Image (cartoon, rainbow, N blue to C red):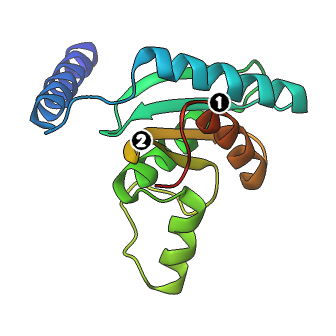
Amino acid sequence: MTRNLHKSVLTAFFLLASTFSLAQDSESLMTYDLATQAMEAAEAYAREQGWNVTILITDQNNNPVKLHRIDGAGERTFGFATAKALVVNATGLTSGEYGQRVQAGDMEEIEGGVTFAGGVPVFRNGQHIGAIATSGVRAAQDEEVSIAGAQVIGSISN
């Protein structure tokens, strides 16, 4: 019985997710090739520093394009990286900037988001194409990794 319930819940989740994806207005601007270039740079930077992190690259619709979890990254790092990407794609700000604005009372908090650094938007030719979010070390260090990836394919500001 429990197994059937789990199957039903998973089926409903995937149907809902696919419906949501189809409802998105815009085509993914973060190509696999761009994400691969950014991931290689971000991961190389993290390894040079000796940081075991999870790196998530999404398109502007918050759909995952690439995910790497370096051996030794904490078990909760995927969840934090996902929450950082969520706020970045919703606001076009870094997750740290978003957090500062929430704390100042200038923005409403986004359900499921986090208010600390590590997620950055990626702009290419003046257009927001996605986010890179890292989790596993201090927030400022997470952001360094994300920036290293973003700078290879674009910039973190418009």
Q: Which residue is mark 1?
A: 54
Mark 2 → mark 1, Cα distance in angstroms: 27 Å
| Residue at 79%, 30% in the rendered image | 46
Q: Which residue is mark 2?
A: 125
Name which residue type carries label 1: Thr
| Residue at 46%, 85% in the rendered image | 105
Q: Position of residue 158 (x, y in %)?
A: 46, 55
Q: Position of residue 121 (x, y in %)?
A: 49, 47
Is residue 135 visible in this depiction of the protein?
A: no
Name which residue type carries label 2: Asn
Q: Nearer the viewer, mark 2 or mark 1?
A: 2
Foreground of the two, 88 or 38: 38
- 22 sits left or right of 74 in the view: left
Among the 4 quarters of the image, the one containing residue 20: top left
Q: Position of residue 74 (x, y in %)?
A: 71, 33
| Residue at 50%, 22% in the rendered image | 35
| Residue at 59%, 19% in the rendered image | 37
Badge 1, how many Cα within 10 Å: few under 14, some, many 20+? many
- 130 sits left or right of 54 in the view: left
Vertically, is 10 above or below 29?
Answer: above
